[in-house]
Image (tube, rainbow, N blue to C red):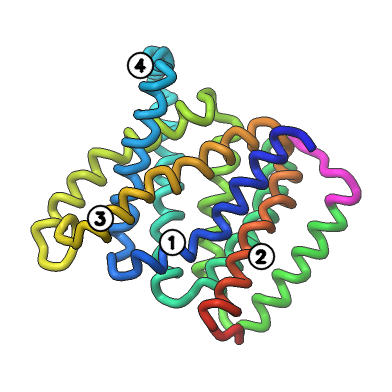
Amino acid sequence: MSSGVLQAALAYAIWGLFPLYFHLVAAVRPLDIVLHRALWSLAFVFAVLAVLRRWTWLGEVMRRPGMLATFALSALLLSGNWLVYVWAVNNGRVVEASLGYFITPLVNVLLGYFVLRERPRRAQWVALTMAAAGVLWLTIFTGSPPWVGLIIAATFGTYGLMRKTAPLGALEGLALETLLLAPLAAGLLAWRASQAGSGLQMEPGLLALLALAGPLTALPLLLFAAGARRIPMATLGVLQYIAPTIQFALGVWLFHEPFA
């Protein structure tokens, strides 16, 4: 097994277990969770960079303004994906969110084929065709367009493509994304903290759980970004079924959500 496959598989396994964490912080509004995720992820990633003393990338970013625009877009896609996913989990729609990640691999393969000119192997086409048929059946069975799932698939699929072709490494790229999100996140969080029952006005235990979102968010993203740079989009797409399979099982059997 290649290192890229292992890194991506571990990232997807961690993401598959995320509903367990978000149920622990369900008392916090989805937007506040996303804002905390951005800030605590920034703190964690920059702590790692400080330990490793890896700062030369900042000079490269300053010399290439176009890189800022690229990572601003990837940061926007990432935060949008976070917000929709957290909202879905906290509103009892884990199954629908998992459907989005079932669709995402199909988006990955299509982007790899049309944008990167990748040519999946025959076995991968067979597996993806079967997966597409399953997704179509699930979509018809639910009886309504899976808007949550479609948004999740579109945002994360495009994010995966951008990180695969990004000019920065996994750690530096995530650092730049969270750095670009930080001013907006800090400003919104400060404003919401002044509103009753939101922002920073919470029990210490709950705030500690939100701080845990830093490493919980950063570690799988680092694994994903590192793996995405080493393996084809088609392989990345097949591996991605790990996360929604775990999420679907949690939604149906642990959280007792109806699937109909």
Residue 164 in the image: above or below residue 260: above
Which residue lies under the disc numbered 3?
207
User: In 3D space, how far apart are the residues under numbered discs 4 and 2 (Cα atoms)?
Assistant: 41 Å
Kindly identify which numbered label has been placed on residue 62.
Answer: 4
Q: Quadrant of residue 63?
A: top left
| Residues drawn in magenta | 117-124
* Element under disc 4: helix
Instruction: Decide: few, some or many residues near mark 1? Use Cα within 10 Å; few <14, some 14-19, many ≥20.
Output: some
Local crowd size for mark 3, using a 10 Å CA cut-off: few (<14), some (14–19), many (≥20)? some
Q: Which residue is label 1 attached to?
A: 21
Check disc 3 and give the amino acid type.
Leu
Whole-Å distance between the Cαs marked 3 and 2? 30 Å
Secondary structure of the residue carrying tag 1 is helix
How far apart marks 1 and 3 lie (CA) works out to: 13 Å
Residue 204 higher or lower than 55, as above or below: below
Q: Earlier in the sequence, mark 2 or mark 1?
A: 1
Front-most of 97 and 44?
44
- Residue at the far right in the pictured view: 122
Mark 1 and mark 4 in contact? Answer it, CB < 8 Å.
Answer: no
The structure residue drawn at horizontal position 58% and vertical position 41%, both measured from the top left corner, is 224
Would you identify the image quadrant in which residue 33 lies? bottom left
